Image (spheres, rainbow, N blue to C red):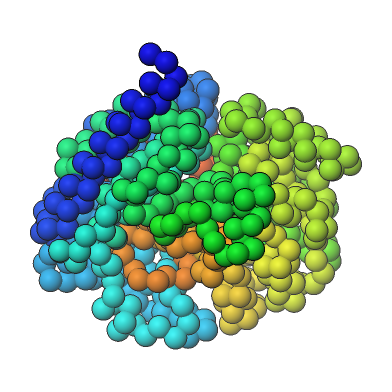
Amino acid sequence: MSVTDTQAATRRDLDRAVEELKVGAERWAHTPVADRAALFRRVHASVAGAAQDWVAAAVEAKQIEPSAPYAGEEWMTGPYGALESAAAYARSCEALAAGGSPLDGLHVGVAPGNRVAVRVLPRTAQEWVLFNGFRAEVWMPPGVPGRQVRAEAGLGAGKVGEYGGVGLVLGAGNISSIAPLDAFYELVAHNRASLVKLNPTFDGLLDVYRAALAPLVEAGVVRVVTGDAAVGAYLTRHDGIDKVHVTGSAGTHDAIVWGTGEEAVRRRAAGDPQLTVPITSELGGVAPMIVVPGRWSAADLRFQAEHLVSMRLHNAGHNCVAGQVVVLSADWAQKDDFLAELRAALARMPARDPWYPGTDAKVARARDVHPRAEHLAGRILTRVEPGDPACTDEYFAAVLAWTEVPGHGAEFLRAAVGLANDSLSGTLGANVVVRPQDRRAMGPAFDGLIADLRYGTVAINAWTGVSFLLPGATWGAYPGHTLADVGSGIDVVHNGHLLSGPERTVLTGPFRPFPRSVLRGELSLFPKPPWFSGSRSGTETGRALTRYAAAPSWGRLVPVLLAAFRA
Protein backbone atom coordinates (compact mmCIF):
# COMPACT_ATOMS: atom_id res chain seq x y z
CA MET A 1 0.00 0.00 0.00
CA SER A 2 1.41 3.40 -0.95
CA VAL A 3 1.78 6.31 1.44
CA THR A 4 -1.18 8.01 -0.22
CA ASP A 5 -3.31 4.88 0.16
CA THR A 6 -2.30 4.57 3.81
CA GLN A 7 -3.24 8.18 4.50
CA ALA A 8 -6.60 7.71 2.79
CA ALA A 9 -7.31 4.60 4.85
CA THR A 10 -6.36 6.43 8.05
CA ARG A 11 -8.69 9.29 7.19
CA ARG A 12 -11.54 6.89 6.51
CA ASP A 13 -10.99 5.34 9.94
CA LEU A 14 -10.98 8.79 11.55
CA ASP A 15 -14.12 9.81 9.67
CA ARG A 16 -15.84 6.64 10.88
CA ALA A 17 -14.79 7.35 14.47
CA VAL A 18 -16.23 10.87 14.30
CA GLU A 19 -19.53 9.57 12.92
CA GLU A 20 -19.73 6.95 15.67
CA LEU A 21 -19.10 9.63 18.28
CA LYS A 22 -21.91 11.79 16.90
CA VAL A 23 -24.29 8.90 17.49
CA GLY A 24 -22.81 8.31 20.94
CA ALA A 25 -23.11 11.99 21.89
CA GLU A 26 -26.76 12.00 20.84
CA ARG A 27 -27.39 8.88 22.92
CA TRP A 28 -25.55 10.40 25.89
CA ALA A 29 -27.66 13.56 25.65
CA HIS A 30 -30.77 11.51 26.40
CA THR A 31 -29.18 9.29 29.05
CA PRO A 32 -30.75 9.75 32.51
CA VAL A 33 -28.42 11.26 35.09
CA ALA A 34 -28.55 8.14 37.25
CA ASP A 35 -27.40 6.06 34.28
CA ARG A 36 -24.55 8.50 33.67
CA ALA A 37 -23.43 7.94 37.25
CA ALA A 38 -23.64 4.18 36.78
CA LEU A 39 -21.51 4.40 33.63
CA PHE A 40 -18.75 6.20 35.54
CA ARG A 41 -18.91 3.56 38.23
CA ARG A 42 -18.19 1.02 35.49
CA VAL A 43 -15.35 3.20 34.21
CA HIS A 44 -13.93 3.23 37.73
CA ALA A 45 -13.96 -0.57 37.83
CA SER A 46 -12.47 -0.80 34.35
CA VAL A 47 -9.57 1.52 35.23
CA ALA A 48 -8.90 -0.53 38.36
CA GLY A 49 -8.71 -3.68 36.27
CA ALA A 50 -6.26 -2.11 33.84
CA ALA A 51 -4.07 -0.37 36.44
CA GLN A 52 -1.15 -2.81 36.41
CA ASP A 53 -0.93 -2.83 32.62
CA TRP A 54 -1.33 0.95 32.55
CA VAL A 55 1.68 1.46 34.80
CA ALA A 56 3.77 -1.10 32.93
CA ALA A 57 3.09 0.66 29.63
CA ALA A 58 3.84 4.12 31.10
CA VAL A 59 7.10 2.90 32.62
CA GLU A 60 8.13 1.52 29.24
CA ALA A 61 7.15 4.72 27.44
CA LYS A 62 9.30 6.77 29.80
CA GLN A 63 12.24 4.34 29.73
CA ILE A 64 12.06 3.81 33.49
CA GLU A 65 13.49 0.79 35.25
CA PRO A 66 10.50 -0.81 37.05
CA SER A 67 12.61 -1.02 40.24
CA ALA A 68 13.61 2.66 40.14
CA PRO A 69 12.53 4.71 43.20
CA TYR A 70 10.49 7.08 41.04
CA ALA A 71 8.48 4.39 39.24
CA GLY A 72 5.75 5.08 41.81
CA GLU A 73 5.05 8.35 40.02
CA GLU A 74 3.37 6.34 37.27
CA TRP A 75 0.91 4.77 39.71
CA MET A 76 -0.03 8.13 41.19
CA THR A 77 -0.20 10.19 38.00
CA GLY A 78 -1.72 7.39 35.94
CA PRO A 79 -4.48 5.03 37.12
CA TYR A 80 -4.77 6.60 40.59
CA GLY A 81 -5.70 9.97 39.10
CA ALA A 82 -8.20 8.37 36.71
CA LEU A 83 -9.80 6.34 39.51
CA GLU A 84 -10.28 9.39 41.72
CA SER A 85 -11.73 11.40 38.84
CA ALA A 86 -14.18 8.70 37.72
CA ALA A 87 -15.42 8.27 41.29
CA ALA A 88 -15.88 12.03 41.72
CA TYR A 89 -17.99 12.36 38.57
CA ALA A 90 -20.06 9.36 39.58
CA ARG A 91 -20.75 10.96 42.98
CA SER A 92 -21.70 14.30 41.42
CA CYS A 93 -24.10 12.63 38.99
CA GLU A 94 -25.58 10.55 41.80
CA ALA A 95 -26.20 13.69 43.83
CA LEU A 96 -27.94 15.37 40.88
CA ALA A 97 -30.01 12.27 40.15
CA ALA A 98 -31.23 12.28 43.76
CA GLY A 99 -32.33 15.89 43.45
CA GLY A 100 -29.34 17.27 45.32
CA SER A 101 -26.18 19.16 44.41
CA PRO A 102 -22.55 18.15 43.79
CA LEU A 103 -21.77 20.53 46.67
CA ASP A 104 -23.87 18.63 49.21
CA GLY A 105 -21.78 17.96 52.30
CA LEU A 106 -19.07 20.49 51.40
CA HIS A 107 -18.27 23.54 53.49
CA VAL A 108 -18.91 26.78 51.60
CA GLY A 109 -17.11 29.70 53.23
CA VAL A 110 -15.43 32.97 52.33
CA ALA A 111 -12.07 33.99 50.91
CA PRO A 112 -10.38 37.39 50.57
CA GLY A 113 -11.80 39.93 48.14
CA ASN A 114 -15.48 39.04 48.57
CA ARG A 115 -14.95 35.52 47.24
CA VAL A 116 -16.78 32.30 48.00
CA ALA A 117 -14.53 29.37 48.92
CA VAL A 118 -15.69 25.77 48.51
CA ARG A 119 -13.78 23.27 50.67
CA VAL A 120 -13.06 20.22 48.48
CA LEU A 121 -10.47 18.47 50.72
CA PRO A 122 -10.82 16.75 53.10
CA ARG A 123 -14.25 15.49 52.18
CA THR A 124 -14.43 12.35 54.37
CA ALA A 125 -12.78 10.92 57.47
CA GLN A 126 -10.62 8.69 55.29
CA GLU A 127 -9.47 11.70 53.26
CA TRP A 128 -8.66 13.50 56.52
CA VAL A 129 -6.28 10.66 57.37
CA LEU A 130 -4.92 10.12 53.85
CA PHE A 131 -4.23 13.83 53.25
CA ASN A 132 -3.55 14.65 56.86
CA GLY A 133 -2.63 18.29 57.31
CA PHE A 134 -3.77 19.24 53.80
CA ARG A 135 -6.74 21.38 52.84
CA ALA A 136 -7.97 22.44 49.42
CA GLU A 137 -10.50 25.11 48.49
CA VAL A 138 -11.88 26.27 45.17
CA TRP A 139 -12.22 30.05 45.13
CA MET A 140 -14.87 31.64 42.97
CA PRO A 141 -14.44 35.07 41.32
CA PRO A 142 -15.08 38.15 43.48
CA GLY A 143 -18.71 39.05 43.97
CA VAL A 144 -20.29 35.71 43.01
CA PRO A 145 -22.76 34.92 45.84
CA GLY A 146 -22.89 31.53 47.52
CA ARG A 147 -26.47 30.88 46.44
CA GLN A 148 -25.41 31.29 42.80
CA VAL A 149 -22.45 28.95 43.30
CA ARG A 150 -24.80 26.25 44.64
CA ALA A 151 -27.47 26.84 42.02
CA GLU A 152 -25.07 26.61 39.07
CA ALA A 153 -23.03 23.62 40.29
CA GLY A 154 -23.49 20.63 38.00
CA LEU A 155 -22.80 22.23 34.61
CA GLY A 156 -24.01 19.90 31.85
CA ALA A 157 -24.20 16.80 34.04
CA GLY A 158 -27.82 17.36 34.95
CA LYS A 159 -28.95 18.71 31.58
CA VAL A 160 -30.58 15.71 29.95
CA GLY A 161 -31.41 16.47 26.34
CA GLU A 162 -28.48 18.84 25.79
CA TYR A 163 -26.32 17.68 22.85
CA GLY A 164 -22.68 18.72 23.21
CA GLY A 165 -21.37 17.34 19.94
CA VAL A 166 -17.96 15.79 19.33
CA GLY A 167 -14.73 17.21 20.68
CA LEU A 168 -11.12 16.55 19.78
CA VAL A 169 -8.86 15.98 22.78
CA LEU A 170 -5.20 16.37 21.87
CA GLY A 171 -3.53 14.53 24.70
CA ALA A 172 -0.32 15.55 26.40
CA GLY A 173 2.72 13.30 26.23
CA ASN A 174 4.11 13.66 29.74
CA ILE A 175 1.50 12.51 32.29
CA SER A 176 -0.53 9.46 31.37
CA SER A 177 -3.79 10.42 33.08
CA ILE A 178 -4.14 13.79 31.33
CA ALA A 179 -5.93 12.66 28.16
CA PRO A 180 -8.44 10.39 29.95
CA LEU A 181 -9.22 13.08 32.53
CA ASP A 182 -9.79 15.64 29.78
CA ALA A 183 -12.20 13.26 28.01
CA PHE A 184 -14.06 12.62 31.29
CA TYR A 185 -14.58 16.33 31.83
CA GLU A 186 -15.76 16.97 28.28
CA LEU A 187 -18.39 14.27 28.68
CA VAL A 188 -19.68 15.09 32.16
CA ALA A 189 -19.43 18.88 32.16
CA HIS A 190 -20.33 19.54 28.53
CA ASN A 191 -22.17 16.41 27.28
CA ARG A 192 -19.51 16.14 24.59
CA ALA A 193 -18.10 12.89 23.19
CA SER A 194 -14.34 12.87 22.61
CA LEU A 195 -11.97 11.67 19.94
CA VAL A 196 -8.75 11.37 21.93
CA LYS A 197 -5.65 11.70 19.81
CA LEU A 198 -2.60 10.55 21.75
CA ASN A 199 0.72 12.32 21.79
CA PRO A 200 3.24 10.03 20.02
CA THR A 201 5.16 9.53 23.28
CA PHE A 202 2.18 7.56 24.57
CA ASP A 203 1.34 5.58 21.44
CA GLY A 204 2.33 2.44 23.36
CA LEU A 205 -0.55 3.04 25.79
CA LEU A 206 -3.24 2.82 23.11
CA ASP A 207 -4.46 -0.68 24.06
CA VAL A 208 -4.30 0.15 27.77
CA TYR A 209 -6.41 3.27 27.32
CA ARG A 210 -8.97 1.40 25.26
CA ALA A 211 -9.19 -1.28 27.96
CA ALA A 212 -9.33 1.18 30.85
CA LEU A 213 -11.98 3.32 29.13
CA ALA A 214 -13.88 0.35 27.68
CA PRO A 215 -17.30 1.36 29.10
CA LEU A 216 -17.00 4.77 27.41
CA VAL A 217 -15.78 3.22 24.18
CA GLU A 218 -18.66 0.75 24.19
CA ALA A 219 -21.12 3.59 24.89
CA GLY A 220 -19.81 5.36 21.78
CA VAL A 221 -18.68 8.51 23.63
CA VAL A 222 -14.90 7.99 23.47
CA ARG A 223 -12.55 6.87 20.73
CA VAL A 224 -8.77 6.74 21.19
CA VAL A 225 -6.44 7.02 18.21
CA THR A 226 -2.78 7.54 17.46
CA GLY A 227 -1.08 9.39 14.66
CA ASP A 228 1.46 11.97 13.65
CA ALA A 229 1.10 15.73 13.25
CA ALA A 230 -0.72 15.23 9.95
CA VAL A 231 -3.45 13.27 11.75
CA GLY A 232 -3.79 16.03 14.32
CA ALA A 233 -4.00 18.68 11.60
CA TYR A 234 -6.64 16.70 9.71
CA LEU A 235 -8.77 16.36 12.83
CA THR A 236 -8.55 20.02 13.87
CA ARG A 237 -10.02 20.92 10.47
CA HIS A 238 -12.58 18.11 10.40
CA ASP A 239 -16.12 19.38 9.85
CA GLY A 240 -17.43 16.81 12.32
CA ILE A 241 -15.40 18.23 15.22
CA ASP A 242 -17.30 20.80 17.29
CA LYS A 243 -14.57 21.77 19.76
CA VAL A 244 -10.85 21.22 20.45
CA HIS A 245 -9.07 20.80 23.77
CA VAL A 246 -5.28 20.72 23.86
CA THR A 247 -2.74 20.17 26.61
CA GLY A 248 0.75 21.23 25.60
CA SER A 249 2.58 24.43 24.77
CA ALA A 250 1.38 27.86 23.73
CA GLY A 251 3.24 27.32 20.46
CA THR A 252 1.17 24.23 19.71
CA HIS A 253 -2.03 26.07 20.58
CA ASP A 254 -1.15 29.01 18.34
CA ALA A 255 -0.26 26.75 15.42
CA ILE A 256 -3.71 25.16 15.69
CA VAL A 257 -5.52 28.47 16.01
CA TRP A 258 -3.52 30.77 13.70
CA GLY A 259 -1.38 28.48 11.52
CA THR A 260 2.34 29.00 11.05
CA GLY A 261 4.74 31.38 9.32
CA GLU A 262 3.47 34.35 7.35
CA GLU A 263 -0.07 33.01 7.35
CA ALA A 264 -0.14 33.10 11.15
CA VAL A 265 1.12 36.68 11.18
CA ARG A 266 -1.54 37.73 8.70
CA ARG A 267 -4.34 35.94 10.53
CA ARG A 268 -3.35 37.39 13.90
CA ALA A 269 -3.27 40.90 12.51
CA ALA A 270 -6.70 40.41 10.96
CA GLY A 271 -8.15 38.60 13.98
CA ASP A 272 -9.02 35.73 11.65
CA PRO A 273 -8.20 32.35 13.25
CA GLN A 274 -8.00 29.35 10.96
CA LEU A 275 -9.68 27.22 13.65
CA THR A 276 -13.41 27.73 13.27
CA VAL A 277 -14.58 25.93 16.43
CA PRO A 278 -14.02 26.77 20.12
CA ILE A 279 -10.80 25.66 21.78
CA THR A 280 -9.84 25.22 25.43
CA SER A 281 -6.34 24.56 26.63
CA GLU A 282 -3.87 23.87 29.44
CA LEU A 283 -0.45 25.12 28.40
CA GLY A 284 1.95 25.32 31.32
CA GLY A 285 4.32 28.16 32.07
CA VAL A 286 7.14 29.18 34.40
CA ALA A 287 6.04 28.31 37.94
CA PRO A 288 7.37 30.31 40.90
CA MET A 289 8.38 28.88 44.28
CA ILE A 290 8.19 31.75 46.76
CA VAL A 291 10.12 31.17 50.00
CA VAL A 292 8.99 33.50 52.80
CA PRO A 293 11.96 34.21 55.11
CA GLY A 294 11.93 33.22 58.77
CA ARG A 295 14.03 31.60 61.49
CA TRP A 296 14.35 28.05 60.20
CA SER A 297 16.06 25.08 61.81
CA ALA A 298 18.68 23.10 59.93
CA ALA A 299 16.06 20.38 59.40
CA ASP A 300 13.62 22.95 58.01
CA LEU A 301 16.21 24.16 55.51
CA ARG A 302 17.00 20.64 54.36
CA PHE A 303 13.37 19.53 54.09
CA GLN A 304 12.17 22.56 52.15
CA ALA A 305 15.17 22.40 49.81
CA GLU A 306 14.19 18.80 49.00
CA HIS A 307 10.59 19.95 48.64
CA LEU A 308 11.45 22.56 46.02
CA VAL A 309 13.87 20.31 44.18
CA SER A 310 11.18 17.61 44.03
CA MET A 311 8.83 20.11 42.40
CA ARG A 312 11.45 20.51 39.69
CA LEU A 313 12.64 16.90 39.29
CA HIS A 314 9.33 15.02 39.41
CA ASN A 315 8.86 13.18 36.10
CA ALA A 316 12.44 14.17 35.19
CA GLY A 317 11.30 17.81 35.07
CA HIS A 318 8.84 17.12 32.24
CA ASN A 319 5.83 18.73 33.94
CA CYS A 320 3.88 21.81 32.91
CA VAL A 321 3.67 22.83 36.56
CA ALA A 322 7.20 21.96 37.66
CA GLY A 323 8.60 24.74 39.84
CA GLN A 324 11.23 26.65 37.86
CA VAL A 325 12.09 29.92 39.61
CA VAL A 326 12.80 30.09 43.37
CA VAL A 327 12.08 33.55 44.80
CA LEU A 328 14.13 34.34 47.93
CA SER A 329 14.51 37.37 50.16
CA ALA A 330 17.74 39.29 49.63
CA ASP A 331 17.54 40.21 53.31
CA TRP A 332 17.05 36.71 54.69
CA ALA A 333 19.89 35.88 57.08
CA GLN A 334 19.62 32.20 56.09
CA LYS A 335 19.49 32.73 52.34
CA ASP A 336 22.98 31.32 51.74
CA ASP A 337 22.27 28.37 54.03
CA PHE A 338 19.13 27.59 52.05
CA LEU A 339 20.95 27.85 48.74
CA ALA A 340 23.57 25.44 50.07
CA GLU A 341 20.82 22.94 50.91
CA LEU A 342 19.26 23.51 47.49
CA ARG A 343 22.57 22.62 45.82
CA ALA A 344 22.96 19.57 48.03
CA ALA A 345 19.45 18.35 47.24
CA LEU A 346 20.01 18.73 43.50
CA ALA A 347 23.23 16.74 43.78
CA ARG A 348 21.91 13.86 45.90
CA MET A 349 18.48 13.17 44.41
CA PRO A 350 18.31 9.88 42.47
CA ALA A 351 19.84 10.06 39.00
CA ARG A 352 17.37 10.11 36.15
CA ASP A 353 17.85 10.56 32.44
CA PRO A 354 15.54 12.89 30.53
CA TRP A 355 13.13 11.01 28.28
CA TYR A 356 10.84 13.63 26.74
CA PRO A 357 11.64 14.46 23.07
CA GLY A 358 13.44 17.77 22.63
CA THR A 359 14.79 17.96 26.18
CA ASP A 360 18.45 17.92 25.14
CA ALA A 361 17.93 21.00 22.98
CA LYS A 362 16.19 22.87 25.78
CA VAL A 363 18.93 22.03 28.27
CA ALA A 364 21.57 23.10 25.75
CA ARG A 365 19.75 26.39 25.26
CA ALA A 366 19.60 26.94 29.02
CA ARG A 367 23.30 26.15 29.30
CA ASP A 368 24.19 28.56 26.51
CA VAL A 369 22.30 31.53 27.96
CA HIS A 370 23.55 30.88 31.50
CA PRO A 371 27.31 30.39 31.16
CA ARG A 372 27.83 30.93 34.91
CA ALA A 373 25.26 28.34 35.94
CA GLU A 374 26.18 25.61 38.41
CA HIS A 375 26.05 22.01 37.18
CA LEU A 376 25.06 19.52 39.86
CA ALA A 377 24.73 15.84 38.98
CA GLY A 378 23.60 16.77 35.48
CA ARG A 379 21.18 19.41 36.76
CA ILE A 380 21.45 23.15 36.27
CA LEU A 381 21.10 25.81 38.98
CA THR A 382 21.40 29.45 37.98
CA ARG A 383 20.74 32.87 39.42
CA VAL A 384 18.56 35.11 37.26
CA GLU A 385 16.96 38.54 37.14
CA PRO A 386 13.57 39.49 35.65
CA GLY A 387 13.84 39.40 31.88
CA ASP A 388 16.13 36.36 31.90
CA PRO A 389 15.06 33.55 29.53
CA ALA A 390 14.47 31.32 32.57
CA CYS A 391 11.60 33.65 33.49
CA THR A 392 9.89 33.25 30.14
CA ASP A 393 11.01 29.91 28.68
CA GLU A 394 9.42 26.79 30.19
CA TYR A 395 12.45 24.48 30.12
CA PHE A 396 10.52 21.25 30.84
CA ALA A 397 13.79 19.82 32.17
CA ALA A 398 16.05 19.69 35.23
CA VAL A 399 16.87 23.41 35.10
CA LEU A 400 16.27 25.39 38.30
CA ALA A 401 16.65 29.16 38.62
CA TRP A 402 16.59 31.46 41.61
CA THR A 403 16.18 35.18 42.11
CA GLU A 404 15.70 37.57 45.01
CA VAL A 405 13.66 40.57 46.10
CA PRO A 406 14.09 42.61 49.29
CA GLY A 407 12.14 42.51 52.51
CA HIS A 408 10.67 40.40 55.26
CA GLY A 409 7.13 39.28 56.00
CA ALA A 410 4.37 40.97 54.03
CA GLU A 411 6.85 43.39 52.42
CA PHE A 412 8.76 40.48 50.92
CA LEU A 413 5.65 38.55 49.92
CA ARG A 414 4.18 41.60 48.18
CA ALA A 415 7.37 42.03 46.15
CA ALA A 416 7.52 38.31 45.34
CA VAL A 417 3.88 38.25 44.21
CA GLY A 418 4.57 41.25 41.98
CA LEU A 419 7.57 39.51 40.43
CA ALA A 420 5.59 36.31 39.82
CA ASN A 421 2.64 38.14 38.28
CA ASP A 422 4.62 40.55 36.14
CA SER A 423 7.92 38.84 35.25
CA LEU A 424 7.19 35.11 34.91
CA SER A 425 5.35 33.64 31.93
CA GLY A 426 2.13 31.78 32.52
CA THR A 427 -0.52 31.56 35.21
CA LEU A 428 -0.97 27.82 35.80
CA GLY A 429 0.48 27.30 39.27
CA ALA A 430 2.41 29.10 42.03
CA ASN A 431 3.98 27.67 45.19
CA VAL A 432 4.52 29.49 48.50
CA VAL A 433 6.54 28.16 51.45
CA VAL A 434 5.98 29.85 54.82
CA ARG A 435 6.32 28.91 58.49
CA PRO A 436 2.95 28.96 60.30
CA GLN A 437 4.14 31.54 62.81
CA ASP A 438 5.37 33.82 60.01
CA ARG A 439 2.03 33.46 58.27
CA ARG A 440 0.18 34.32 61.47
CA ALA A 441 2.39 37.35 62.00
CA MET A 442 1.24 38.74 58.64
CA GLY A 443 -2.41 38.36 59.61
CA PRO A 444 -5.02 39.14 56.92
CA ALA A 445 -2.29 40.62 54.71
CA PHE A 446 -1.06 37.09 53.92
CA ASP A 447 -4.43 35.91 52.61
CA GLY A 448 -4.86 39.11 50.65
CA LEU A 449 -1.49 38.63 48.95
CA ILE A 450 -2.36 35.03 48.09
CA ALA A 451 -5.50 36.41 46.46
CA ASP A 452 -3.29 38.81 44.49
CA LEU A 453 -1.37 35.91 42.90
CA ARG A 454 -2.83 35.51 39.41
CA TYR A 455 -2.53 31.73 39.12
CA GLY A 456 -5.06 28.97 38.56
CA THR A 457 -3.63 26.95 41.45
CA VAL A 458 -1.77 28.29 44.47
CA ALA A 459 -0.11 25.81 46.83
CA ILE A 460 0.96 26.91 50.31
CA ASN A 461 3.52 24.57 51.87
CA ALA A 462 2.61 22.07 49.17
CA TRP A 463 3.21 21.51 45.48
CA THR A 464 0.62 22.52 42.93
CA GLY A 465 1.15 19.16 41.21
CA VAL A 466 -0.68 17.52 44.13
CA SER A 467 -3.74 19.58 43.28
CA PHE A 468 -3.69 18.11 39.76
CA LEU A 469 -4.59 14.74 41.32
CA LEU A 470 -7.34 16.04 43.62
CA PRO A 471 -10.59 15.32 41.77
CA GLY A 472 -12.50 18.11 43.48
CA ALA A 473 -9.88 20.73 42.64
CA THR A 474 -9.93 22.74 39.44
CA TRP A 475 -7.03 22.64 37.01
CA GLY A 476 -6.20 25.32 34.51
CA ALA A 477 -4.83 28.81 34.02
CA TYR A 478 -6.00 31.90 35.85
CA PRO A 479 -9.04 33.32 34.04
CA GLY A 480 -8.63 36.01 31.41
CA HIS A 481 -6.49 34.58 28.64
CA THR A 482 -7.66 34.90 25.04
CA LEU A 483 -6.94 33.23 21.70
CA ALA A 484 -4.58 36.08 20.84
CA ASP A 485 -2.79 35.98 24.21
CA VAL A 486 -3.34 32.45 25.43
CA GLY A 487 -0.80 32.37 28.28
CA SER A 488 -1.31 29.14 30.24
CA GLY A 489 -4.60 28.38 28.56
CA ILE A 490 -8.34 28.91 28.56
CA ASP A 491 -10.91 27.32 30.91
CA VAL A 492 -10.45 24.49 33.43
CA VAL A 493 -10.64 20.69 33.62
CA HIS A 494 -11.05 18.13 36.46
CA ASN A 495 -13.43 20.18 38.69
CA GLY A 496 -15.16 17.09 40.10
CA HIS A 497 -17.88 19.10 41.85
CA LEU A 498 -18.70 20.79 38.53
CA LEU A 499 -18.49 24.39 39.72
CA SER A 500 -19.44 27.03 37.18
CA GLY A 501 -16.75 29.61 36.38
CA PRO A 502 -14.23 28.93 39.19
CA GLU A 503 -11.28 31.26 39.60
CA ARG A 504 -8.63 29.09 41.24
CA THR A 505 -7.79 26.31 43.68
CA VAL A 506 -5.82 27.03 46.87
CA LEU A 507 -4.07 24.02 48.42
CA THR A 508 -2.53 24.25 51.89
CA GLY A 509 -0.23 21.71 53.54
CA PRO A 510 1.92 21.47 56.68
CA PHE A 511 5.25 23.31 56.73
CA ARG A 512 6.97 20.17 57.97
CA PRO A 513 5.54 16.68 58.31
CA PHE A 514 5.35 14.59 61.47
CA PRO A 515 6.72 14.93 64.15
CA ARG A 516 7.80 18.53 63.57
CA SER A 517 4.32 19.64 62.50
CA VAL A 518 2.77 18.30 65.72
CA LEU A 519 5.27 20.24 67.83
CA ARG A 520 4.24 23.38 65.94
CA GLY A 521 0.57 22.83 66.49
CA GLU A 522 -0.12 21.53 62.97
CA LEU A 523 -1.51 18.13 62.14
CA SER A 524 0.29 15.79 59.77
CA LEU A 525 0.87 12.08 60.19
CA PHE A 526 3.50 11.54 57.53
CA PRO A 527 7.30 11.90 57.74
CA LYS A 528 7.80 12.82 54.06
CA PRO A 529 5.39 13.11 51.11
CA PRO A 530 5.63 10.12 48.73
CA TRP A 531 6.06 12.37 45.67
CA PHE A 532 9.44 13.59 46.95
CA SER A 533 12.26 12.70 44.57
CA GLY A 534 14.17 11.07 47.41
CA SER A 535 11.27 8.93 48.64
CA ARG A 536 12.39 5.35 49.25
CA SER A 537 8.88 3.90 49.15
CA GLY A 538 7.30 5.90 46.34
CA THR A 539 6.52 2.85 44.22
CA GLU A 540 5.08 0.88 47.12
CA THR A 541 3.01 3.88 48.21
CA GLY A 542 1.76 4.56 44.68
CA ARG A 543 0.68 0.96 44.22
CA ALA A 544 -1.08 0.87 47.60
CA LEU A 545 -2.73 4.23 46.93
CA THR A 546 -4.11 3.00 43.61
CA ARG A 547 -5.41 -0.18 45.24
CA TYR A 548 -7.10 1.95 47.88
CA ALA A 549 -8.69 4.25 45.26
CA ALA A 550 -10.07 1.18 43.46
CA ALA A 551 -12.09 0.21 46.57
CA PRO A 552 -11.70 2.72 49.41
CA SER A 553 -11.81 1.21 52.88
CA TRP A 554 -10.03 1.57 56.18
CA GLY A 555 -8.42 -1.82 55.57
CA ARG A 556 -6.92 -0.68 52.28
CA LEU A 557 -5.88 2.66 53.75
CA VAL A 558 -3.55 1.07 56.31
CA PRO A 559 -1.03 -0.25 53.72
CA VAL A 560 -0.87 3.25 52.20
CA LEU A 561 0.05 4.73 55.57
CA LEU A 562 2.59 2.04 56.33
CA ALA A 563 4.29 2.53 52.97
CA ALA A 564 4.28 6.32 53.36
CA PHE A 565 5.96 6.07 56.75
CA ARG A 566 8.88 4.29 55.08
CA ALA A 567 9.48 7.25 52.77
| Residue 18 place in picture, x, y as percent | 28, 42
Compared to 516, does 439 lie above or below?
below
Between residues 218 and 474, which one lies in front from this camera angle?
Answer: 218
Q: Going 47% across and 85% down the picture, which residue do you hit?
A: 114
Residue 320 can be seen in this image = no
Residue 116 appears in the rendering:
yes
Write down the quadrant of residue 543 in the picture. Answer: top left
Q: Could you say where residue 153 lies in the image, as x and y percent from the top left?
A: 28, 71
Residue 411, image x and y in percent? Answer: 75, 76
The image shows residue 58 at horizontal and vertical percentages of 43, 29
386 to the left or right of 196? right
The residue positioned farthest toward the right in the image shown:
372
Give me the residue at 54% from left, 70% from top.
Answer: 480
Is 263 left, or right, of 373 in this rendering?
left
Q: How many marks?
A: 0
| Point 66% across, 38% down: residue | 397
Is residue 509 positioned above or below 562 on the image? below
User: Is 172 left or right of 196, judged from the image as shown?
Assistant: right
Which residue lies at the image location 61% right of the left edge and 60% below the top edge?
Answer: 268
Q: Nearer the viewer, residue 199 or 93?
A: 199
In the image, residue 383 sits, relative to residue 438, either above or below, namely above
Q: Quadrant of the N terminus?
A: top left
